[in-house]
Structures are given as structure tokens and as C-alpha cells.
Image: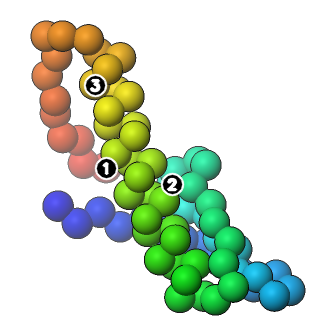
Amino acid sequence: MNNLYTAVIKQDGDWWIGWIEEVPGVNCQEVSRDELLESLRITLREALEFNRRDAIAAAGGNYQEEQIAV
């Protein structure tokens, strides 16, 4: 599955800053645009994995997983 997310990025002085629109809390700053995009990818990947583990832990036992397309 290839999910696409939207990075909102801008240069602010000497720094590039950015956020992932669809996932609150995923934001980074770097000295170059390319470094920023890579940091956003890594941070997004980590946030999604954390959220998955958190959801499974909250469900406890005897749960089902369903994929939902929007």
C-alpha cells in the first residue's frame, strides 16, 4: 500500500520548516529542503508506527483490524 501525505514546507531565514498536513505533531526543521523532506518522511513513518502500536495496545485482546479507504 502506498499512502500519500501532504508536506507543507517553507524556508524561514536559514532554515527549512515543514509539517505533514494530515498528521498532527509531525513537523521538522532542517538546513536544506532535501534534508527537511527526508526528516519529515522518517518522522511520519515513526509517528504512524507509534500510533499503530498505541491503537493495538488500547484495544487489548480480541480485536479485528479493517482497512478503510477514504
Q: Nearer the viewer, mark 1 or mark 3?
A: 3
What amino acid is found at the position of numbered circle 1 in the picture? Val
Per the image, the residue denoted by label 1 is: 70
Judge by depth and name the residue closer to the eye, 55 or 29: 29
Label 1 crowd (10 A; few <14 / some 14-19 / many >=20): few
Label 2 crowd (10 A; few <14 / some 14-19 / many >=20): few
Inter-mark Cα distance, 1 to 2: 13 Å
Inter-mark Cα distance, 2 to 3: 21 Å
Q: Is residue 11 visible?
A: yes
What amino acid is found at the position of numbered circle 3 in the picture? Ile
- In the rendered view of the protein, which quadrant contains the N terminus? bottom left
Quadrant of res 31: bottom right
Q: Residue at x 16, y 16 (%)?
A: 63
Residue 2 position, x and y percent, is 23, 66
Tell me the SS state at disc 1. loop
Q: Residue at x 66, y 78 (%)?
A: 30
* Mark found first going from the N terminus, 2 or 3: 2
Judge by depth and name the residue closer to the eye, 52 or 35: 35
In the displayed structure image, the side of residue 23 where residue 70 appears, left or right: left
Q: Residue at x 35, y 17 (%)?
A: 58
Looking at the image, is 31 positioned above or below residue 48? below
Per the image, the residue denoted by label 2 is: 22
What amino acid is found at the position of numbered circle 2 in the picture? Glu
Label 3 crowd (10 A; few <14 / some 14-19 / many >=20): few
Tell me the SS state at disc 2. loop
Q: Is residue 21 visible?
A: no
Inter-mark Cα distance, 1 to 3: 21 Å
Tell me the SS state at disc 3. helix
Q: Residue at x 62, y 60 (%)?
A: 27
Per the image, the residue denoted by label 3 is: 56
